[in-house]
Image: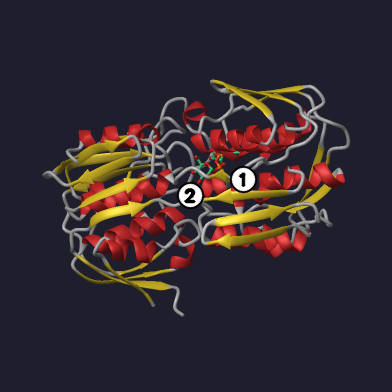
Amino acid sequence: MEDAYSIHGGKPLTGNVQLSGAKNAALKMVIGALLFDGKVTLNNVPRIRDLDELLHLFTELGATAEFIDANTVVIDGTGLNTNTVDLLHGSKIRSSFLLFAPLLKRFKEAHIPNPGGCRIGARPIDRIMNGLKELGGVVEYDHATGYYHGKLAQKTHGTYTFEKPSHTGTEFMIMLSVFAEGTVHIHNAALEPEIDDLISFFNEGGAQIHRDGSSIIVNGVTSLVQKKPYTIVSDRNEAVTFAVLGLITKGDVTVGPINPELLSTFILEVKKCGGGVEIINPNKIRFHYIGPFTASQIETEPHPGFMTDWQQNWVVLMTQAQGISTVHERVFENRFAFVSELQKLGANIEFDTTPVPNAKQYYHFTYDPEKVYKQAIKIYGPQQLHSGVLTVTDLRAGATLAIAALLVPGESIVNGVSILERGYERFVEKVTELGGDIKRL
Ligand code: EPU
């Protein structure tokens, strides 16, 4: 099979989309399941490539993970029998470093390859590994092998303040602290709702984790035991992709189940630029075309701001808006690799490299004043895009290129779609159900 989609665009997409479970909650929860005594059942687990990779790693570590129906997995970490994560599979997934938590709990020492994931900027884990050290652990990186070697002999306690909030970093600190000797305080923690989903999952199993704004307080417990299956929250990023598809194709798409509050910043921007939004009920949102879009000015931020994962989809929408739109990426460096692909379709987008004041504070990555960054773009719209042959650069960019191809009449080929499928479940089927003409080659 080719790693590509053939898309004939130009049709309005209409209908309902049943959202899948959130990738960025599911990956962490299946790892968190290894901290429990006995079996853990998770519902609404998305069948995506990143998850398949991770569950493959589980079997190599001696744990079991079995799907008992399409989206329900039963995980049992009882049989964990090695403290070394395989280089090939471990390095493919960003979240694999979270395996430190269950492996350190079981073996006191663990070896994990430098995490992979989408190549969006350097994505170091320095701030996260500092957290492990702050809780009394030791961690060393071996440049020759690409492995992190970690040790955590005693039970944890203490305080850790993130220099800048980190989504997965916050989850890592929570996982390390669940069995603390006393209390662990995590300050300047990230606010993403997927983290709160993970906290609820642990608390249902007996953990004592409390959020107080950007601080998280963990009172250690001795064990976690699941009492009833846990259902993973819906994927906000998937909701945004289908919302943009409905709007840009002059269609009408309803997404759910999703709490509209989790998308409030996105909804606000859609309304501001002239898109139609209707909150149908506390779990369903309709996005529909009501007239020409107008330009917008976006800066990405961690939750509750405009998410970095939404900007790529937003950029293609803004190619259809009247005026000059701007998007400034503050969270990750190098998250505009897809721009050159959109330019192939005739998009009029240029980079704005004007330095910002206080760049070290402004950006969430570690800013190096010696480097030239391409963090901001201007989009001149509206532009009539045409079909073309495109290559996916990273996960969210993959959805963006598919959106562009579904907008334009004629056949487009999108290459490298296995990257998109790392995070979108049944993408082809869902688009087809909305009336889109898309085939996997
Ligand atoms: N950072 C460091 N050092 C660290 C940790 C983070 O420099 O030790 C930097 C990162 O390089 C980045 C910024 O801090 O520039 C924020 O990173 P964060 O740790 O918050 O992001 P993440 O946990 O790596 C998760 C999601 C991303 C999502 C962001 C923001 C997962 C597996 N990934 O990344 O999702 O964009 O949070 O919410 O949960 C995606 O789904 O496509 C995706 C990239």
Q: Amino acid at mark 2?
A: Gly
Q: Look at 27% across and 64% down and name the residue there.
A: 405
SS for callout 2: loop
Residue identified by numbered label 1: 29
Give the residue at the far front of this rendering. Answer: 228
Q: Give 241 or 363, whichever is nearer the viewer.
A: 241
Q: Could you tell whether 103 is left or right of 441 in the image?
A: right
**422 up-or-down from 229: above or below:** below
Point out residue 379 in the picture as x, y percentages from the top left corner: 25, 46
Q: Could you tell whether 139 is left or right of 226 in the image?
A: right
Q: Give 116 or 41, whichever is nearer the viewer.
A: 41
Residue identified by numbered label 2: 21
State which quadrant residue 84 falls in.
bottom right
Q: Is there a contact, CB below 8 Å, between mark 1 and mark 2? A: no
Give the residue at the far bottom of this rendering. Answer: 1
Q: Amino acid at mark 1?
A: Met
Rendered-image quarter of ligand 1:
top right
State which quadrant residue 228 falls in.
top right
Asked if one can make out residue 150 in the rendered structure from this viewpoint, the answer is: no
Q: Look at 86% across and 43% down and name the residue there.
A: 108
Q: Give 26 or 379, whichever is nearer the viewer.
A: 26
Q: Quadrant of the C terminus?
A: bottom left
Q: Is mark 2 within 8 Å of ligand 1?
A: no
**410 up-or-down from 346: above or below:** below
